[in-house]
Image (spheres, rainbow, N blue to C red):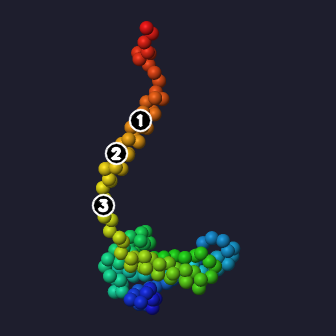
Amino acid sequence: MLKINEQITLQSWELSEQFVRASGPGGQHVNKTSSAVELRFEAEKSPSLSDPVKRRLKIIAGSRWTKDGAIVLKCDDTRHQVRNREIVLKRLKDMIRKSLLKPKSRVPTRPTLASKRKRLSEKKNRAGLKSNRARISTKDISFD
């Protein structure tokens, strides 16, 4: 069992972990030991999470969400299996806690009349500066 908060506890059948060979530095030790952890959380089948939380979790998980509705997290940050396991469990907890927060709905606003006028006057000033930089054509000059 994995406790997320007071209300949510994940059952042991929802989680499965597999230890695989890690990539990166470590010399011969890397080739001999399976220190990387691959955690699989059956999010779609989880009775602990509500449907809106699952939808937000799917967005947060991104490419880590599989077609069958599971989240696969991998960690090979350290050379220690136990530490990698702690890191991957913390990542899962953080993802679920983040999905529990309902995003604030955006209230659409309109720009004020003063801000519109200010934007247009700045635009006019800028256009004036640029027009003063333009070359003067010979048609505009009179030699009287």
**Circle on res. 127:** 1
Label 1: few (<14), some (14–19) or many (≥20) C-alpha neighbours in 10 Å? few
Name which residue type carries label 2: Arg
Three-letter residue code for mark 1: Ala
**x, y percent for residue 4:** 44, 86
Image point (48%, 76%), residue name: 73
Q: Left or right: 107 with respect to 63?
A: left
Judge by depth and name the residue closer to the eye, 88 or 76. Answer: 88
Instruction: Return the x and y of residue 22 as percentages of the image width and height.
Output: 59, 75
Residue picked out by circle 3: 108
Locate residue 85, reporting x and y percent.
55, 83
Residues at marks 3 and 1, CA–CA distance in whole angstroms: 30 Å
Q: Quadrant of the C terminus?
A: top left
**Residue to which mark 2 is pinned:** 117
Please report the residue visible at 31 percent of the width from the left and 50 percent of the height from the top. Answer: 113
Mark 2 and mark 3: span between their CA atoms?
20 Å
Q: Amino acid at mark 3?
A: Pro
- Closest to the camera, between mark 2 and mark 3, is 2
Front in this rendered view, residue 56 or 46: 56
